[in-house]
Amino acid sequence: MTQKSLMELAVEARDHAYAPYSHFKVGAAIRAASGKVYQGVNVENAAYPEGTCAEAGAIAAMILGGDTEIAEVAVVGDAPAPVTPCGGCRQKLAEFAPKGVVVTMGTTQGGELVQRIEELIPHAFAAAQMER
């Protein structure tokens, strides 16, 4: 049995997204430093835009699973070109991903954009800055 790639798992997750208002489904898959993989989807509600992003869902699942460090990220959206994570998710990812972690953004049609976390958010807030 072949192991699914992180992108395949993000596409699989996207199929379960709940986006009845925008119809823009997003799936994310995170590989933690432990090797465990966590998935997340965007979830919309009538109090738009009070939904949650796929990346945030995957991070929450990772924390619940006992992991705290991201080793790799894949995000897939319903767009003709790869869509980068929103600003809030970039910050969330940066808090759990050390420099050099690869974020692959893809489309259901196979398009792909690959960047390191520090390229997505070069001036992320750090927990140490908040402890002053």
Image: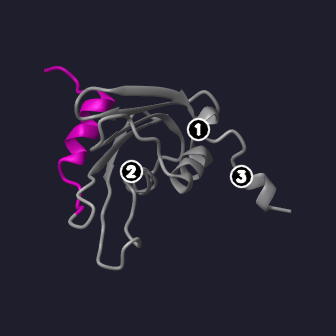
- Front residue of 26/83: it is 83
The mark lying in front, picked from 2 and 1, is 1
Gap in Å between the C-alphas at discs 2 and 1?
18 Å
**Secondary element at tag 2:** helix
Where is residue 106 shown, x and y percent of the image? 34, 33
Give the number of the mark in front: 3 or 1. Answer: 1
On whether residue 6 falls in the magenta region, the answer is: yes
- Residue indicated by mark 1: 120
Can you identify the residue that label 2 sits on? 58
Q: Secondary structure at mark 1?
A: helix
Quadrant where the N terminus lies? top left
Q: Is residue 111 above or below residue 20?
A: above
Q: Which residues are magenta?
A: 1-19
Dot 3: element: loop
The amino acid beneath tag 2 is: Ala
First along the sequence among labels 3 and 2: 2
Residue beneath the point at 22% across and 30% down: 109
Q: Amino acid at mark 1?
A: Leu
Image x and y of residue 118, in percent: 64, 34
Q: Earlier in the sequence, mark 3 or mark 1?
A: 1
- Residue at point 61%, 27% (across, down): 100
Q: Residues within 10 Å of mark 2 (few under 14, many from 20)?
A: many
**Residue under the point 24% across and 46% down:** 13
In the image, residue 96 lies at what x, y percent?
Answer: 57, 45
Q: Residue most toward the bottom?
A: 47
